[in-house]
Amino acid sequence: MIAVLKPGTTDQQRDSLCEWFKGMGLQVHVSQGEFHTIIGLLGDTSKVDINLLESLSIIESVKRITEPFKNANRKFHTDDSVIDVGGFKFGGGHFQVIAGPCSVESEEQIVGVAKRVKAAGANFLRGGAFKPRTSPYDFQGLHADGLKLLSLAKQQTGQPIVTEIMNINDLPLFEDADVIQVGARNMQNFDLLRELGRTDKVILIKRGLANTLKELLMSAEYVMAGGNERIILCERGIRTFETYTRNTLDLSAIPMLRELTHLPVVADPSHGTGKARLVEPMALAAAAAGADGLMIEVHPEPERALSDGAQSLTPDQFDRLMAKVHKIREAIQA
């Protein structure tokens, strides 16, 4: 349930109303917008008398929220959430590019890529230290050593780090990570999501291979229910009957999520297509569709990459892509 307060409501009146709700055993979430203040109520709202609530002089309107996701719901928080990571912002008109190799392989590789993608305009460095692979015989990442190399690249370039966690027991190793990624295979690892809800790290949640938008938002809700509201959503393609691409990048998910939630939404055309030649057109399409950012895989020698070389751009290809992304952004903001 949400209660919209009338303009001119004082802080004392708002706080008094919130205390009344808390006295009913409800959780209270206050969202202060530019023109309205919205009070979101979580818990058993059946005990709230809507007629009585609507009769109060400070109440403009009362609505029941039927969707199971509450904190992530735009009805609870009408303005876009802006997630600040080291001075770089996602959401609310801010656009960021996250770029780097699928897997951290060596100091030379990760530092070299970091410098190139930063020069092209990518403010964030991505790189996998722990890699979930379909085959147990494939490269699984450098683990703790990979995180150390990411930290080294961060020291040299100043770029915030985005990297994936697979096991909550490894969380102490992620102290230097700026954004912790929950991969598609872990999107519904609810124990992991609950624990990440107790951290103050920014969490990037990727949509699962066969999950609905509602399920993605419920995963965000698990983190937010723990108290962490610093969340970025990522559309990275879903599994369909199509075989010409690795996944089907659901571009319609971007405007749909922007309608449903206040959380920033980024797109990953690298995993979304699985083919390097398709990354540029789908990245441009995602930017045009209103994405708050892009996640792009870049490797100095894709043909020698230890994972996902087929979908990785070279640094030169990334340079050209970024020039076009800037043009698309200028066009849609005109």
Image: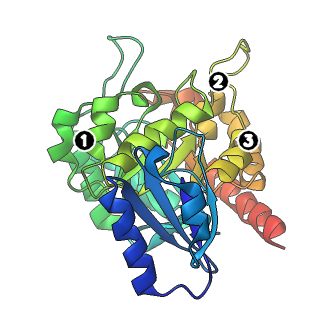
- Residue 171 is situated, as x and y percent measured from the top left of the image, at 20, 42
Q: State which mark lies toward you, 2 or 1.
A: 1
Q: Residue at x 54, y 84 (%)?
A: 9
**Does 84 appear above or below 125?**
below
Q: Is residue 105 visible?
A: no
**What residue is pinned by disc 2?**
247
Label number found at residue 150: none
| Amino acid at circle 1 | Glu
Provide the secondary structure element on which disc 3 rests.
helix
| Amino acid at circle 2 | Asn
Q: Are marks 1 and 3 in contact (CB under 8 Å)?
A: no
**What residue is pinned by disc 1?**
195
Q: Residue at x 21, y 49 (%)?
A: 148
Picture quadrant of residue 293: bottom right
| Amino acid at circle 3 | Met
**Does 279 appear above or below 209?**
below
Q: CA distance from mark 1 to mark 3?
A: 34 Å
Q: Are marks 3 and 2 in contact (CB under 8 Å)?
A: no
- Residue 76 is situated, as x and y percent measured from the top left of the image, at 55, 58
Q: First in sequence, mark 1 or 3: give its number.
A: 1
- Residue 312 is situated, as x and y percent measured from the top left of the image, at 56, 37
